[in-house]
Image (cartoon, rainbow, N blue to C red):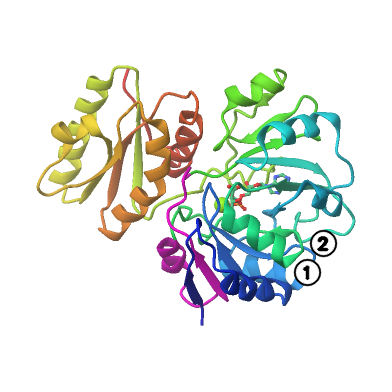
Amino acid sequence: MTRVFQVDPQHIDPEIMEQAAHSLQHGQLVAFPTETVYGIGANALDPAAVDRIYAAKKRPKGDPLIVHIADAAQLPMVVAEVPQIARRLIEQFWPGPLTLILPKNASIPNNVTSGMPAVAVRMPNHPIALDLIRRAGVPVAAPSANLFSRPSSTSGRHVLEDFIDSLDIVLDGGDASIGVESTVINLVAEPPIILRPGGLSLEALQAVIPEVQLKSTYAAEDEVVASPGMLLKHYSPNARLLLFTGTDASRVCEQMQLEAQQLETSGLRIGVLGTSAQREPLAADNRVFFELGAADDLEGISKSLYRGMRELDAQQVDVILVSAPLKEGLGLAIWDRLYRAAEGNIIRVD
Ligand code: TXA
Ligand code: MG
């Protein structure tokens, strides 16, 4: 049975945290909030505990995990070396939504990295996550707390939707503040390459390392890729998702309306992940409209994105219609998640 504890991030209950840390030390799984999304944690130095993560998530063994630390002093336990560029990024952005790929330390079991010589590491910016890792005294391997290829969890309730009884403890610390996963950057590559855009923007990284590149191609599931987790089918709601792109917002909206009406004529139930301005034209009696936020409020949209996908699934819509944000700031990560969720169903309105 999974035990659920409500934890106030501002007043962390030490007794609950001691229980959770104890569970981690004994090879069990503890879900915890981070500033990006919830994670399912296990002792990263315990290969059997790490195996339990893959089993609980039904995650393919070839998709490696991020190791979470609470203190830069833990870094030598995880990586073999800390190059100068990593030091600069750590100083600027940790704790925070940035994951670094670096050569792995021999003490990290092979199943954490899916047998690869490099390991992903980050220091989350969340008081509950940091407290848990400190008390456990070990680095904590933690993927996002969702079943494989489902939208990530941004609340304790989402974690329980996916994992009723396969975890030991869920620490429910409220809604995640960023709502999309960390930015993953490969520092073993030359120049450094962003494998997954995320909560830290490309622009912020470019300010520190102008040479950084963005991996621009998205692999189909059967291709061999540098970051094995970056499959195209990912972050998907159960419903089919149609992504509308185009620079003219009102024409995009008109096209969404036409498409929705056509699909409704054929008997399908439609959900819209919409901006505030799209509510008036697109909300309708027989449709489910989930408001993400104002089109220019990218923080608001990223925070509600996965909740929206999950709520539309819960309302059992057949098709979700959504328009793409600008690819700047957090918009790049939002665009990336929608693009993957759409699995190629892109409608270009030019
Ligand atoms: O914000 C986040 O990063 C959240 C929270 C819980 O920290 N975690 C998360 O983990 O999103 P996960 O497992 O859902 O995604 C990890 C990504 C995957 O795309 C994986 O392929 C990549 O990081 N990754 C992990 N280790 C890697 C490695 N050694 N080399 C290349 N890519 C790696
Ligand atoms: Mg994930």
Q: Residue at x 16, y 51 (%)?
A: 267
| Residue type pointed to by label 2 | Pro
Which mark is drawn over residue 109? Answer: 2
Q: Nearer the viewer, mark 1 or mark 2?
A: 1
| Residue type pointed to by label 1 | Asp
Which residue extends farthest front?
11
- Which is nearer the eye, 189 or 11? 11
198 inside magenta stretch: no
Magenta highlight range: 156-179
Is 209 placed above or below 35 here?
above
Left or right of 32 on screen, residue 119 = right
Which mark is drawn over residue 179? Answer: none
Q: Which residue is mark 1?
A: 46
Which residue extends farthest left?
285
Q: Position of residue 190 (x, y in %)?
A: 80, 26
Q: Position of residue 65 (x, y in %)?
A: 68, 54
- SS category of the residue bearing label 2: loop
Q: Is residue 116 visible?
A: no
